């Protein structure tokens, strides 16, 4: 009985370790300080500032930064999948830049916007200001 | 420099920290009583048992009941602060339904500790102390000890779904339909838990008599409550 339990434990550890190793993403280039998720993106990369669309590689980097931010700062209320409601907050996929700024910085809504919830659980997170462009890119990213 | 700890979020975090710190103290002792001390008492001799009852159990019960008290108070405070700050509507969400189910289980457990287990064990300890000094046992001590046992087993039973719903509140989004029947869900959960609590106060151990039994029943109760939550919120 005890041997069976020990075997099951060892097997599950090995299997989950193997799965984690198999899913490990390809090694990316060594990060520079400017690649911190909250680092201000270069002006040329901010989609609202430039008239021309981002190059695919730049957009991909922004989406990736946004994903990191979302999965660490937003999921506890909005859930892992932005297209589905979370445990406390509604679905947020497709949020506009104005909506994100209003919700993240000002605890408010853009003029004329009809809120999905009447609760006031989302408090301002001013430290995320420089990440809004990235979040916007992630939440509006097209599927591949 | 502004420290994150000195703000409303920090205050809530401190409440949560104390909630699970004292929760560990409480539930750790609950599992000690049910999984460790109980089987030990079944095997040991009368003198050892009397010594343990007089010198070990009172200390364990002290940490047990005060752990329960602080866990309960901090838990209610968190709910109150959240409701006041964020609006009562948060309780009509997946988070709210889960956390309230866990909270009800926790409150029943707290009540069992302070109003059933501790008063009964006080008599058991007093009886053992009297016998050890050559006196007579208290006539109701054995029955009270048995009653405390059913209540304690019930707390073990409740602790399993309680921990599940505390975790699922923020980590398992349950999709709510357009018109969830919260009333029906509250009634179903209420009836199930009330029946089990009445059994704790007046009934028998049943399948909870063994350690394995109470753990299996705990998982079964969790499954039943979770399914009720999924079905009645669509």
Image (spheres, rainbow, N blue to C red):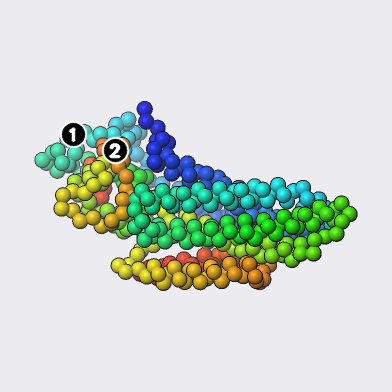
Q: Is residue A113 left or right of residue B106?
A: left
Q: Indicate the quadrant where residue B184 lies.
A: bottom left
Q: Residues within 10 Å of mark 1 (few under 14, many from 20)?
A: few
Q: Residue furthest left?
A: A51
Q: Which residue is mark 1?
A: A43
Q: Residue at left 71%, top 57%?
A: B121
Q: Residue at left 54%, top 55%?
A: A12
Residue B204 in the image: state x and y as whole percent.
Answer: 67, 71
Q: Which residue is mark 2?
A: A126
Q: Is residue A20 left or right of residue A26?
A: right
Q: Residue at left 53%, top 57%?
A: B106
Residue B205 in the image: state x and y as whole percent.
Answer: 67, 69
Q: Quadrant of the N terminus of chain A?
A: bottom right
| Mark closer to the chain start, 1 or 2 | 1
Front residue of this view, candidates A17 and B210 = B210
Q: Quadrant of the C terminus of chain A?
A: bottom left
Residue A86 visible (yes or no): no
Location of residue A142 with respect to B216 vertically, above or below: above
Q: Is residue B85 left or right of residue B38?
A: left
User: Residue B160 got which mark?
Assistant: none
Residue A86 in the image: state x and y as whole percent.
Answer: 35, 56
């Amino acid at each position: 009985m005890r041997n069976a339990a020990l075997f099951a434990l060892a097997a599950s550890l090995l299997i989950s370790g193997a799965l984690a190793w198999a899913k490990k993403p390809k090694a990316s280039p060594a990060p520079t300080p400017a690649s911190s998720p909250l680092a201000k993106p270069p002006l040329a990369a901010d989609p609202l500032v430039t008239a021309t669309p981002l190059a695919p590689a730049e957009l991909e980097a922004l989406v990736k930064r946004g994903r990191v931010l979302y999965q660490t700062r937003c999921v506890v209320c909005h859930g892992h999948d932005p297209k589905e409601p979370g445990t406390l907050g509604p679905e947020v996929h497709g949020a506009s830049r104005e909506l994100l700024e209003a919700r993240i910085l000002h605890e408010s809504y853009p003029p004329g916007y009809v809120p999905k919830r009447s609760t006031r659980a989302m408090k301002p997170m001013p430290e995320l200001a420089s990440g809004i462009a990235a979040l916007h890119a992630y939440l509006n990213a097209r599927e591949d | 420099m502004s420290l994150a700890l000195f703000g409303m979020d920090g205050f809530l975090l401190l409440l949560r920290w104390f909630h699970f710190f004292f929760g560990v103290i409480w539930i750790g002792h609950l599992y000690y009583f049910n999984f460790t001390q109980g089987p030990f008492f079944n095997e040991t001799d009368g003198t050892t048992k009397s010594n343990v009852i007089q010198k070990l159990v009172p200390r364990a019960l002290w940490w047990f009941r005060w752990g329960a008290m602080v866990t309960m108070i901090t838990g209610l405070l968190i709910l109150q602060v959240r409701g006041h700050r964020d609006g009562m509507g948060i309780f009509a969400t997946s988070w709210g339904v889960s956390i309230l189910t866990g909270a009800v289980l926790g409150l029943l457990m707290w009540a069992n500790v302070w109003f059933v287990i501790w008063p009964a064990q006080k008599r058991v300890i007093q009886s053992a102390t009297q016998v050890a000094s050559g006196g007579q046992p208290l006539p109701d001590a054995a029955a009270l000890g048995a009653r405390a046992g059913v209540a304690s087993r019930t707390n073990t039973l409740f602790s399993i779904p309680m921990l599940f719903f505390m975790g699922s509140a923020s980590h398992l989004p349950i999709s709510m339909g357009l018109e969830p029947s919260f009333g029906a869900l509250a009634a179903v959960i209420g009836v199930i838990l009330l029946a089990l609590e009445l059994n704790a106060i007046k009934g028998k151990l049943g399948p909870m008599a063994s350690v394995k039994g109470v753990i299996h029943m705990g998982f079964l109760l969790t499954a039943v409550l979770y399914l009720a939550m999924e079905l009645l919120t669509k």
